[in-house]
Image: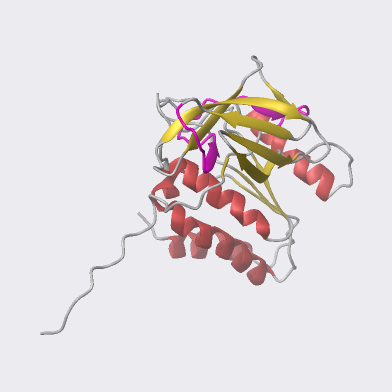
Amino acid sequence: MPGPGNIFDGVVYPTLGYGMKGVIWYQGETNAGRAYEYAQLFPFMIEQWRKEWKEGDFPFYWVQLADYMAEKPEPGESAWAELRESQTKTMKLPNTGQAVIDDLGEGRDIHPRNKHDVAARLVRWALVKDYGMKIPYRSPEFKSVDFKDNKADLTFDTFDTNLYTFDVDEARGFAVCGEDKVWHWAKGKVTGHNTIEVSSDQVAKPIAVRYAWADNPVCNVYGDDGLPLTPFRTDDFPMITKPAQPAATTKK
């Protein structure tokens, strides 16, 4: 298999010099096991492409990983969730955007067939940011959390939309943990246009919340424009994809 340098030299480099309006990027599955490193590699790649083209910070929009593989009965760790987080963090770069599609995947197919809705979510970014249209375009994102007794009150950036739950009133897809860092499913309730309250009978004093933190999450929170809530976590616990540190050697 050719290395990334070969792919760049053979496919990307020959296009340098052509005009660049922008990029759409749909990739990440192969890097799920290296999600920790992807948080540095992905923005580095974007910055390098912009440097090579010499056309400034041209638009760069990507698709977050879809839901895939078997659903898990209990909450826990997930390399795919960590990769999604690394993708979301890359939005710190200027003129970037992300289409969240954790509701469009297929558990048994790594390449979901519904490309129409994927494209529709990507095109919203371009229509707003590059062509001046006034339409909803960005999925709601986690903003802050306030822990009080056995509850966690979450606040979100909703970008002029209102949160709602699909199919049932309960906001599903949330998990909480206490000081023992053992995750339990939590019940969620939309309490305002940009707030959700979550709690679990199994966690008397939660210290962290996660949402859609799984390879194939079961979740149902959207903005009323139809865009799903961006997966997130409030904790900074060590990532399972962080490379192990080499063992220290001692001189004899």
Which secondary structure type mostly characterizes the magenta part of the structure? loop
Residue drawn where x is 77% and y is 30% of the image: 192
Which corner quadrant of the image does residue 99 belong to?
top right
Give above or below for 169 relative to 40. Answer: above
Could you say where residue 167 lies in the image, as x and y percent from the top left? 65, 14
The stretch in magenta equals 202-228
Image mark count = 0
In this rendering, does residue 9 appear at all? Answer: yes
Could you say where residue 76 lies in the image, as x and y percent from the top left? 41, 36
Which corner quadrant of the image does residue 124 belong to?
top right
Residue drawn where x is 45% and y is 25% of the image: 107
- Left or right, 95 with reference to 212: right
* Depth order, front residue of 228/120: 228
In this rendering, does residue 28 appear at all? Answer: no
* Depth order, front residue of 228/12: 228
Residue drawn where x is 45% and y is 51% of the image: 237
Q: Please identify the quadrant where the N terminus is shown.
A: bottom left
- Left or right, 182 with reference to 205: left
- Left or right, 135 with reference to 196: right
Give above or below for 39 relative to 102. Answer: below
Q: Please identify the quadrant where the C terminus is shown.
A: bottom left
